[in-house]
């Protein structure tokens, strides 16, 4: 093996041109994911401190921005296998931009906005340079990389402009940039989805989604534990501790049902409508996972007999409704999981959604003990009922449920 064949010297290559292309996530990508642990935690803290309509809308906008920063990098790394020293250096700088973005989130409505917008602009510029570098080193002979580089450089300028414009006009300009990120992929005839070589490694992308879901739900555990530790575990009663445990089990259940039903599964085909549905449904389910993770911190603030905190209850039930609805959409988009689709039926999803909507209407007027019971029925039915059906049919010999 010559020196140039070692990963640290090997120039970026399109995965369709590489004989040794792997679908697994490289450690540099995992390190990039690591900084999102901090970013999502800061984002969750922001929502906890702004539990009103305005705060909810700002949170949702920031989430989309952070998600796209993660996703655009994931798409590039799925298209072009990049492991050399310049790429690692660029990814290290992108990690630093995410650190700045995360640090600016708590103060984003005031002095932190400029830092957030400039950090985001620099992050987009680095993504643009990654594409332009791929073309320069010969990894892309078509105009795909050049168009992507151009698009992200233009967007970087737009985001930088929003850092210095007066508010709220700055927010509208930044929001327009976020919308344009999505449109530059999917617009007919001009979006990059039209390129035959815009073919990310679907298994690689699905694995990245699974890893991010673990991060998002893991943040819920982190927030629960930090909230209780700040209140002091010795200062709460046994009922609050039981609620706390209920919150942890709920987060585990969300991971259980996601990975059993759709986690790490690829879309059935590369049909554009299917890919776009897979993409948008994952944005929705990731957003809802953060909502639920933040909402479950409310378990620490109540005993059995007090109503669940209003803001936490609202976002928790909305999050569960969106989570289950997105999960059902994804089940019909991914390949395989035939047995899962058989038992995780529309009826069981509709039951969970209906129970969460009922709880949304009544939780301010009932003790948290009742609210947690309804919540538990809505969520854990998504595991218990399909499992019961599978065991029943397996015992009857009507369905082969062996691996």
Image (cartoon, rainbow, N blue to C red):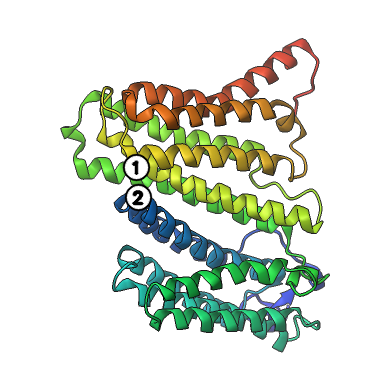
Observer-nearest residue: 352 or 78?
352
Quarter of the image where the C terminus is located? top right
Q: Position of residue 31 (x, y in %)?
A: 50, 64
Left or right of 335 on screen, residue 218:
left
Task: Please determine whether, in this image, residue 73 is positioned above or below residue 24.
Answer: below
Quadrant showing the N terminus:
bottom right
| Frontmost residue, 387 versus 342 | 342
Is residue 395 or residue 305 the one in the foreground? Answer: 305
What whole-number distance in Å separates the C-alpha atoms at marks 2 and 1? 7 Å
The 10 Å Cα crowd at callout 1, few under 14, some 14 to 19, many 20 or more, is: some
Residue 268: image x %, image y %?
Answer: 79, 48
Q: Is residue 183 left or right of residue 41?
A: right
Q: Residue at x 52, y 61 (%)?
A: 64
Q: Are marks 2 and 1 in contact (CB under 8 Å)?
A: yes
Q: Residue furthest front?
A: 169
Residue 70: image location, x then y, percent: 54, 64
* Residue 212 visible within the image: yes
**Looking at the image, how many numbered discs can be counted on the residues?**
2
Quarter occupied by residue 400 = top right
User: Extreme top residue here?
Assistant: 396
Residue for badge 2: 52
Q: Residue at x 48, y 27 (%)?
A: 358
Q: Is residue 150 above or below residue 82?
A: below
Question: Where's residue 362, x and y in %?
Answer: 40, 27
The answer to whether any part of residue 344 appears in the image is no
- SS label for mark 2: loop
The image quarter in which residue 242 lies: top left
Residue on which disc 1 sits: 311
For label 2, the crowd category at 10 Å Cα-Cα, with few meaning under 14, some 14 to 19 and many 20 or more, is some
> Residue at image x 30%, y 66%?
107
């Amino acid at each position: 093996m010559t020196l140039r064949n070692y990963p640290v010297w090997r120039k970026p290559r399109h995965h369709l041109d590489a004989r040794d292309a792997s679908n697994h996530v490289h450690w540099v990508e995992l390190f990039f994911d690591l900084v999102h642990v901090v970013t999502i935690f800061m984002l969750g803290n922001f929502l906890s401190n702004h539990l009103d309509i305005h705060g909810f809308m700002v949170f949702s906008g920031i989430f989309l921005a952070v998600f796209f920063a993660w996703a655009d990098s994931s798409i590039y790394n799925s298209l072009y296998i990049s492991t050399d020293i310049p790429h690692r250096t660029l990814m290290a700088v992108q990690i630093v931009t995410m650190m700045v973005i995360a640090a600016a989130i708590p103060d984003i409505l005031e002095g932190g906005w400029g830092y957030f917008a400039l950090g985001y602009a620099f992050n987009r510029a680095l993504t643009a340079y990654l594409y332009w570098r791929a073309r320069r080193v010969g990894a892309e002979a078509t105009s795909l990389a050049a168009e992507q580089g151009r698009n992200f450089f233009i967007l970087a300028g737009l985001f930088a402009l929003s850092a210095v414009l007066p508010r709220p006009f700055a927010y509208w300009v930044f929001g327009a940039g976020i919308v344009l990120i999505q449109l530059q992929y999917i617009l007919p005839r001009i979006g990059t989805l039209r390129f035959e070589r815009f073919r990310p490694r679907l298994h690689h992308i699905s694995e990245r989604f699974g890893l991010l879901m673990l991060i998002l739900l893991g943040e819920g555990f982190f927030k629960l534990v930090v909230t209780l530790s700040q209140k002091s575990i010795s200062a709460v009663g046994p009922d609050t501790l039981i609620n706390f445990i209920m919150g942890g089990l709920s987060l585990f259940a969300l991971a259980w049902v996601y990975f059993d039903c759709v986690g790490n599964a690829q879309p059935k085909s590369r049909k554009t409508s299917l890919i776009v549905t897979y993409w948008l449904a994952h944005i929705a389910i990731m957003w809802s996972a953060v909502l639920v993770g933040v909402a479950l911190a409310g378990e620490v603030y109540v005993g059995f007999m007090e109503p669940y905190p209003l803001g936490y209850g609202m976002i928790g039930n909305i999050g569960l409704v969106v989570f289950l609805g997105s999960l059902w959409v994804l089940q019909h988009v991914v390949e395989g999981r035939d047995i899962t689709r058989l038992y995780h039926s529309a009826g069981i999803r509709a039951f969970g959604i209906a129970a969460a909507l009922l709880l949304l209407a009544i939780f301010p007027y009932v003790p948290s003990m009742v609210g947690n019971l309804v919540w538990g029925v809505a969520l854990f039915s998504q595991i218990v009922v399909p499992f019961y059906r599978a065991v029943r049919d397996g015992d009857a010999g009507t369905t082969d449920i062996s691996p």
